[in-house]
Amino acid sequence: FNRMGFDDQGIVALSGAHALGRCHANASGFVGPWTPTPTTFNNLYFVELKNVAWEEGCIDGATCKNNQYRNKDGKNLMMLPTDIALVKDASFKTYVDKYASDEKLFFKDFSTAFSTLLELGTQNLYSV
């Protein structure tokens, strides 16, 4: 996202979209949901990322094709290496901490960053 003109705040805000959905091994090589509420848009992604202990490994009962992280306690949630980088990098972590404690701020910043992403448009698309 940096090459698209996003600063650290925008990159972290857009990463919050991981509050929704899950990864599927056959599509990405990663497996599992980021949060226990994968159909609800909220700041739980940041709360989990900040407060949960993560370890390398696949969620229980699944086979991963790529390296990922799972929660140590339940082994039922996942994070990508890029997610973990958000709490290891001091500049990114500043925004993780803010969004974990202030859902309204996350919604505001996500809205701004996502609008910018949409305005950038697409180019060189091809059919699959």
Image (spheres, rainbow, N blue to C red):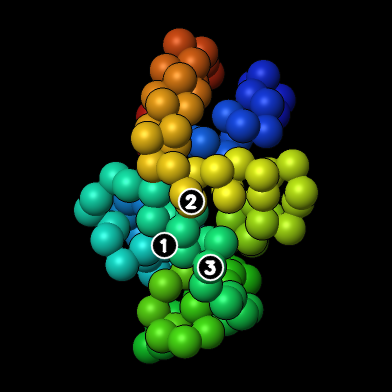
**Residue for point 28% across, 58% down:** 38
Question: In the figure, is residue 108 to the left or right of 4?
Answer: left
Q: Does 75 sit left or right of 20 as displayed?
A: right
Q: Earlier in the sequence, mark 1 or mark 2?
A: 1
Of callouts 1 and 3, the N-terminal one: 1
Q: Residue at x 53, y 68 (%)?
A: 51
Identify which amino acid the numbered label 3 is placed on. Asn
Report helix, strand or loop for mark 1: loop
Work out whether 67 lies above or below 37.
below
Q: Which residue is denoted by mark 2 in the rendering?
A: 100
Q: Earlier in the sequence, mark 3 or mark 2?
A: 3
Which quadrant is the N terminus positioned in? top right
**Quadrant of the drawing holding the C terminus:** top left
Bin the neighbour count of mark 2 within 10 Å (Cα to Cα): few under 14, some 14-19, many 20 and up: many
Secondary element at tag 3:
helix
10 Å crowding of disc 1: few (<14), some (14-19), many (20+): many
Report if residue 1 is visible in the image: no
Q: Amino acid at mark 1?
A: Trp
Q: Position of residue 47 (x, y in %)?
A: 46, 58
The circle drawn on residue 34 is 1
Q: State the image coordinates of residue 20 (x, y, percent, origin top left).
A: 33, 50
